[in-house]
Amino acid sequence: MKWIHCCYRSHYSSSPTVSLYLFPSSPTTPRGGLCDVACVSVKDLSQDRMSRKRRSNHVCQLVCTEAARWWTEHNLFTGMLPVLPLEVLEEMLLNVPPQQVVCVCRLVCREWKEVVDSDSLWRERCRREGYQTYVTKLPKDWRLFYFLCKKRRNLLKNPRADDKFKGWQIMENGGDKWKIESVEEVPLPDNTVQKYFATSYSTCRKSQLIDLEKEGYRPSFMDDFQPDIIISDWYAPRRECGAKYEICVELLNHKKQPIKKFSPGTVIFQNWDDHKWNQMTHVFKNYGPGVRYIRFIHGGKDTLYWAGWYGIRVTNSSIEICPSVDR
C-alpha cells in the first residue's frame, strides 16, 4: 500500500517535531482512508536546515494534491478528514502551486474551501512572493490581486528591437524605411535598453495585435473583473532635426471593432530641441465588457525631409494587465 506523508515543524513544543499525516492510495482502509498521526524528530529527517525546508515544501505539495484528488475521486466527503490546525493547513497550502490550490485543494471539503477562499491565505502568499500594494488602498480581492500580479508581464513582443522586426507588422515604411539603431548618445532610464526603432523622412508606422485569450486572459475574466490595462511607450527626437511622434491604442471586441481608444494628438519636436527620451503612458479603466484584443500602433517621421533616419525614435513599448490598486 502506498503512503504519502506531510512534514510540519511544530512551533508549540520545546522540541520541534514533524507530524506525518498519512493518506493511503487505497480506499479500503479504516476511518475512510485516513490513518493515525505519528510524530518523529526533526533530526531524523536531515541535519541540513535548507534541505529540510526543501523536503518539507515538496512533501506539502504532494499531500495536498494527492489527498484532494483521492477524496474527490472516491466521493468520501464524510467529515472524516483530519482536523488539522488552521496554521498547519495554511502552511501546507502556501507550499502548493497556486493553480492546484484553487482547482484541486479547494474541492476537498468545506473547511479547505473556506481556507482557500480566505483573504489571509492570499495576503500571506503576496507577502512571501513580494507582491506589494499601497497600505492606504488594499485590494478588495486578495486572490484576484495575487493572480494578476503573478501573470503581469509585457504582452508586446520584441519591444526593444532585440530581434529585428519580429512580432511587428509594418503598416507604413516611408522615406528610407524603418531602421534599428543602437542607443548611444542619450541612454534611457532603463539602461538595459540597448536598441531602438528609427523612422525616416516620410511616415513610418508599425503595429501589434494582442489576442487576450491566447495570452491567458479568458473572456469571462475580462468581462467580470475588467483589470487595468497599462500602456507605455518611450520616444525621442534627434537633436539636429525636428520630428513627429504618434501613438494609437485600441481595445477591440471579438470582431476587432473598437470599444475604447487612446489616441493623443501628434507630438511635434522642433529642430535643436531637447532630445531626451520621453514616456507616453495611459491606463484603461472601467472599459466595459467585450474586450478581446488590443491593437498597438506607433510611429512618426522627421519634419525636415532629410534623407536617412532623422525621424522619431521609439523603443521599450509595453502593455500590461494589472490590479487596479497599482495605480
Image: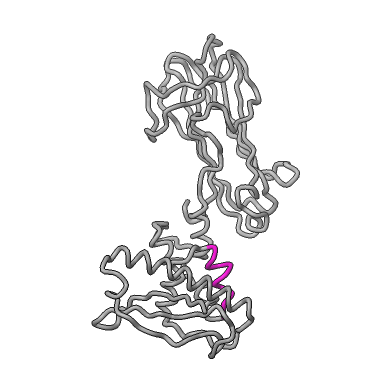
Check residue 155 for magenta coloring.
Answer: no
Q: Nearer the viewer, residue 182 or 322?
A: 182
Rendered location of residue 16, percent (x, y): 28, 79
Residue 96 place in picture, x, y as percent? 47, 66
Which picture quadrant has residue 5?
A: bottom left
Q: Residue furthest front?
A: 1
Residue 13 higher or lower than 257, as above or below:
below
What residue is at 38 percent from the left and 74 percent from the top? 7
Judging depth in this view, the residue of 299 and 15 nearest the camera is 15
**Residue 291 in picture, x, y percent from top left:** 67, 49
Q: Is residue 276 above or below residue 242?
A: below
Does any portion of residue 120 appear in the rendered image? no
Furthest residue toward top: 307
Quarter of the rendering containing residue 10: bottom left
Q: Residue furthest left?
A: 14
Confirm whether residue 298 shows in the render.
yes
Q: Residue furthest right?
A: 255
Q: Residue at x 56, y 39 (%)?
A: 156
- Which residue is at a point 29% across and 69% down the rendered structure image? 46
Residue 105 lies left or right of residue 220; in this view the side is left
Give, as a single range, the part of the protein colored magenta.
99-109
Q: Residue at x 52, y 23 (%)?
A: 268
Instruction: Give the overall secondary structure of the magenta segment.
Output: helix
Display coloring = one colour
Q: x%, y% of residue 321?
A: 55, 49
Query: Position of 117 compared to 73: left or right?
Result: left
